[in-house]
Amino acid sequence: MKNFKVVLEYDGTNYHGWQVQTNAISIQEIIEKALETLLREKVRTYVSGRTDSGVHAKNQVINFKVSTINMKPEKLMVGLNCLLPEDVAIKNVEEVPIDFDSRKSARSKIYRYVILNRKAPTALERHRCWHVRAKLDVDLMNSCAGYLVGEHDFSSFRGTRCNASHAVRKIFRAAFTAQEDDFIHFEIEGRGFLKHMVRNIVGTLVDVGMGKTTLTEFKSIIDAKDRKVAGLNAPPQGLFLQAVNY
């Protein structure tokens, strides 16, 4: 038995998230179909973390185990890229110890959320950012983002139908950075995340940036542990899984 670690990137626009669905196409489905075609056996993939419909990944990590394979990792990468559509790309394949698990072995994950903060929309980046017309106070949003760092109960930012056993998560860093051409990047690194957690945090912090929520009110939202008091769920197209650290 051999265990392979795969790093891939994808544009999630045309997919119903990572996980296999009965009535919609998913990233997992096309990856596993490509592996079955290439290796001539059914393969189950294990992912570092599921992404939702419309969400992108720059460095998603999966692993899979096969009983017999003579193909070198480099040829596996080339073969998979020949079979996959253009909006999914394999960046690296390597053999890893049999006990490596893409999710359980991860030390942290980094997500980036991209906001376009100007009056005019974007044609070229419309599937990769959230267009917010009102001017945002980045400094104030950063002050609030600091409250996220540490171990907290993030029930206020927990998505509906989240099946996690509890809402306590540890965040190592969270900050906004102004970029060129009126883009703002929000990066957050943590040991793990709840369903819709990053998007719900961003939606609430945008309320802060627009002056709808104060710094004190944002802290009270975290302490409330109640999704009803937090802001809207930011749209999926601005979210990227940036990296998984092991």
Image (tube, grey):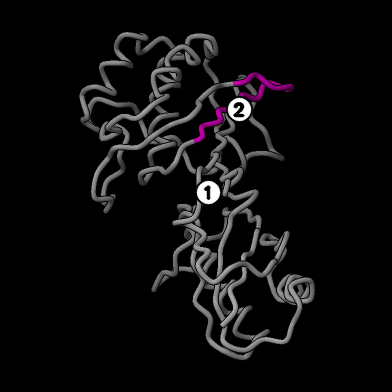
Task: Identify the residue at image location x=62%, y=65%.
Answer: 5
Q: Position of residue 119 (x, y in %)?
A: 61, 20
> Is residue 179 located in the magenta-colored stretch of the structure?
yes
At a point 59% along the width and 36% down the height, the residue shown is 129
Q: Quadrant of residue 122?
A: top right
Numbered circle sitting on residue 165: none
Number of residues whose C-alpha sits closer than 10 Å to that of mark 1, classed few (under 14), some (14–19) or many (20 or more) = many
Q: Which residues are magenta?
A: 177-189
Q: Report the disc number at residue 185.
A: 2
Q: Looking at the image, is 61 positioned above or below residue 196?
A: below
Along the line of sight, the residue nearer the viewer: 136 or 48: 48
Mark 1 residue element: loop
Would you say residue 201 sits in the magenta stretch?
no
Identify the residue at image location x=29%, y=37%. Answer: 168
Instruction: From this view, report whether residue 180 is shown above or below residue 213.
Output: below
The location of residue 72, given as percent across then percent down, is 76, 78
Location of residue 80 by image quarter: bottom right
Three-letter amino acid code at the position of disc 2: His
* 68 sits to left or right of 148: right
Q: To which residue does mark 1 refer?
A: 55
Q: Which SS class for mark 2?
A: strand
Q: Residue 197 location in percent, x, y?
A: 38, 38
Q: Pick the residue in front: 232 or 82.
A: 82
Mark 2 → mark 1, Cα distance in angstroms: 15 Å
The secondary structure that most of the magenta stretch takes on is strand
Residue 54 falls left or right of residue 226:
right
The mark nearer the N terminus, 2 or 1, is 1
